[in-house]
Image (cartoon, rainbow, N blue to C red):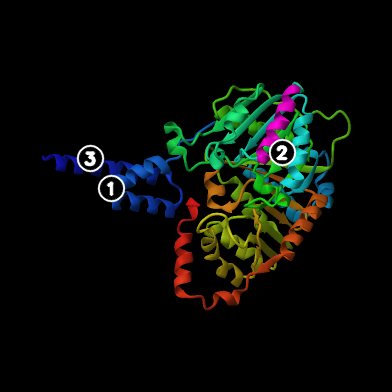
Amino acid sequence: MSSFGIAGFLFLILQIVVTGHIIYRKDDVKSSFGWIGLVWLTPLIGSIVYVIFGINRIRRKALSLRNKGPDILTITGKTEEEIQKEIPRPLLQLMRLGYKVHPQRFALGNTAQAYVNGDEAYPAMCRLISDARKEVLMQSYIFNNDRAGRQFVTALKQAVKNGAKVKVLVDGVGLNYSKPTIAAALKQLPGVEFSVFLPSKSPITLPFVNLRNHRKILIIDGKEAFFGGMNVAEGNLVNTHPKEPIVDITFHVQGPVVDQMSRVFEEDWIFSGKKHFIPASFRAAGPLPGTMPARIIPDGPDADYGKIELMAQGALACAQKTVQIVTPYFLPENEMLTSLELAAMRGVNVEIILPSKSNIFGMDGAMRANFARLLKKGVVIYRTQPPFDHSKILLIDGAWLFVGSANWDVRSFKLNFECNMECVDTALARQVGHIIAHKKSIAQREKLEDYFHRPLLRTLHDNALRLLTPYY
């Protein structure tokens, strides 16, 4: 047999082995067909691409869930009748569903307040850090080496002087959004422990380059936290008129739910190669800060992923009056689009608020490809004018909130390490509702008639971009 014949035989074996792995490991039929087509149409390159990007190599054992129990109703000490008087039945059904999706009990006695943009949030965050006495745990996807990042470096330096133990974790991809990166400045701070989650330049982590830790968590002394989707970047300082301004929202949280955030950070810190540690725990010296029940739902490709997507689908199914979604990127798969349509067809007022112009090339066309089908079913779509809106909110029936780092796209639902907070609180919902109302007041509403006679080339362009949905 010639050398070409041997090479051809080996390529065939490789294709068969890779195809077998795809069939055995991949649950999504469309994804499986796509990968198999790539492997057989481009024999060597397709197999190599699959081995590098298509295999989920991240497996880690999640920390045991504390406060785990048989039913969410047991946490209050009240009867089911008493609880049903306080929480409408559909929301109670949603809370039960959520407990099945992620069996972590609600922590009681919390409070949360929304902060809009870095102009509001950064000074409050830095004050908390500067006043820390025991511990600062800070985790971000992007932590830029700019005037915003330097504010935090100054505050972290003060926390160390106070005697606080400081740990900072930044994603490997997000770290490189600024040059030079913030890494050198943080490493030079005595008393600050710094780690990178899946460093993007390491050959060892090349197979994980498509996976990102998108979580944003700041925890002070185990008592209070800032939690949401806001990165550390001067673009968030909108009032200072940066070159690329970004509108965003984050939440100041106080109460026992902070413990659940600490455990997410703890697990990510250990996964990044650092030593195990015991985070400071919430201890209420007096009355609890508030009355809000809340819990944290982490999600990622390392375990039973898809929890945040499943929670969003459950929320759409349980909604009775209103669904309000604010997200910078809207590229969910067909099942989620169908859930939105069904909610609107049931008579629920479904509103989606998106930026009019994305900060990612091709994203606008890809999102636009799904608008016509949603508009036909009664879903209302608003497009906010610049600055780019990076906020992430899901508000159901003016009471149930789902906020955090996750966008409404395949990357957040399937690939990224994300973290959201589920809570039921009419006061917080009212505040967030006012923020959403303001966004709508300065937005333009999409009209179905604009999609009746669209140019063929524009439709082909948008639909082609939609094919890249998992890779934005």
- Residue holding disc 3: 10
User: Callout 3, which amino acid?
Assistant: Leu
Q: Quadrant of residue 254?
A: top right
- Mark 3 and mark 2 in contact (Cβ < 8 Å)? no
Please tell me whether residue 16 is drawn above or below residue 450 in the rendered image.
above
Give the mark, 2 or 3, whose residue is nearer the N terminus.
3
Count neighbours of disc 2 (C-alpha within 10 A) and say few if under 14, some if 14 to 19, many if 20 or more.
many
Kindly identify the residue that appears in the image at 56 percent across and 46 percent down.
306
Q: Quadrant of residue 150?
A: top right
User: Callout 2, which amino acid?
Assistant: Arg
Q: Quadrant of residue 353?
A: bottom right
- SS label for mark 1: helix
- Report, in whole angstroms, how far the alpha carbon at label 2 lies from the one at label 3: 52 Å
Kindly identify the residue that appears in the image at 66 percent across and 38 percent down.
149
User: Callout 1, which amino acid?
Assistant: Pro
Count neighbours of disc 3 (C-alpha within 10 A) and say few if under 14, some if 14 to 19, many if 20 or more.
few
Residue 428 or 397: which is nearer the viewer?
Answer: 428
Q: Is residue 175 visible?
A: yes
- Residue holding disc 2: 105
**Quadrant (top left, top right, bottom left, bottom right) of the N terminus:** top left
- SS label for mark 2: loop
- Residue holding disc 1: 43
Relative horizontal placement of residue 61, taking residue 70 as reference (left or right): left
Query: Does residue 159 show up magenta in the picture?
Result: yes
Count neighbours of disc 1 (C-alpha within 10 A) and say few if under 14, some if 14 to 19, many if 20 or more.
some
Q: Tell me, for residue 13, which label it has, or none.
A: none
Q: Residue farthest to the right?
A: 286
Bounds of the magenta span?
A: 147-161
Give the mark, 3 or 1, whose residue is nearer the N terminus.
3
On the image, the x and y values in percent for residue 334 come to: 52, 60
On the image, the x and y values in percent for residue 189 come to: 65, 25
